[in-house]
Each structure stands twice: as structure tokens, then as C-alpha cells.
Amino acid sequence: MAGNFYRSPGPGEPPFVKVGDKVRKGQVLCIIEAMKLMNSIESDQDGTLVEIVAEDGKPVAADDPLFVIKP
């Protein structure tokens, strides 16, 4: 999905996840805003978040990596 990447649910709010966090499959990691719609992006696996590739507030394309999760 193409749109803008947001790490938190709203301005001034803490991010959904940060590097080093343990994440579970189905956990919300970020929001992608596309055409004024906010779409929650969930983890597709359990693991540890080792890198946040996308930059907060910047556009991302459909195949851009957003996170690196180590199982």
C-alpha cells in the first residue's frame, strides 16, 4: 500500500513499537495513511524488532520494507 508511514497513533503520542521490542504476530506496528484513510499495519510474525527502516511521516511505496524483525 502506498502512503505516508507513521510510527505512532497521533502527534505527540508514543510510537507503537521501538527497536528492541518483542512483537507478536498481529500486533500493530505502525499506520499507513493512504487517501486520507488510516490503515493499521500488523506484524506477520513473532520476534524482536531490530530495525525501523521507514522514516516517520515520509512516503512509502507498496513494496518498501518498513521493519526488520528477527524471529
Image (cartoon, rainbow, N blue to C red):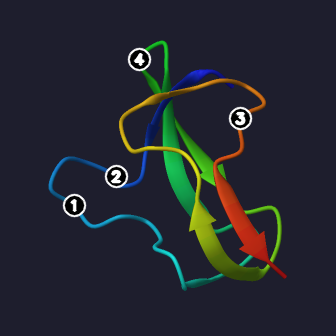
Mark sitting on residue 36: 4
Q: CA distance from mark 2 to mark 1?
A: 7 Å
Q: Earlier in the sequence, mark 4 or mark 1?
A: 1
Q: Which residue is mark 3?
A: 64
Foreground residue among 36 and 49: 49
Residue type indicated by callout 4: Lys
Q: Which residue is mark 2?
A: 9
Q: Earlier in the sequence, mark 3 or mark 2?
A: 2
> Which x, y percent locates residue 58?
42, 31
In this rendering, is residue 60 above or below 51?
Answer: above
Left or right: residue 29 versus residue 61 is left
Left or right: residue 14 versus residue 19 is left
Within 10 angstroms of label 1, few (less than 14), some, or many (20 or more) residues? few
* Quadrant placement of the C terminus: bottom right
Residue type indicated by callout 2: Pro
> Which x, y percent locates residue 45?
83, 71
Q: CA distance from mark 1 to mark 3?
A: 24 Å
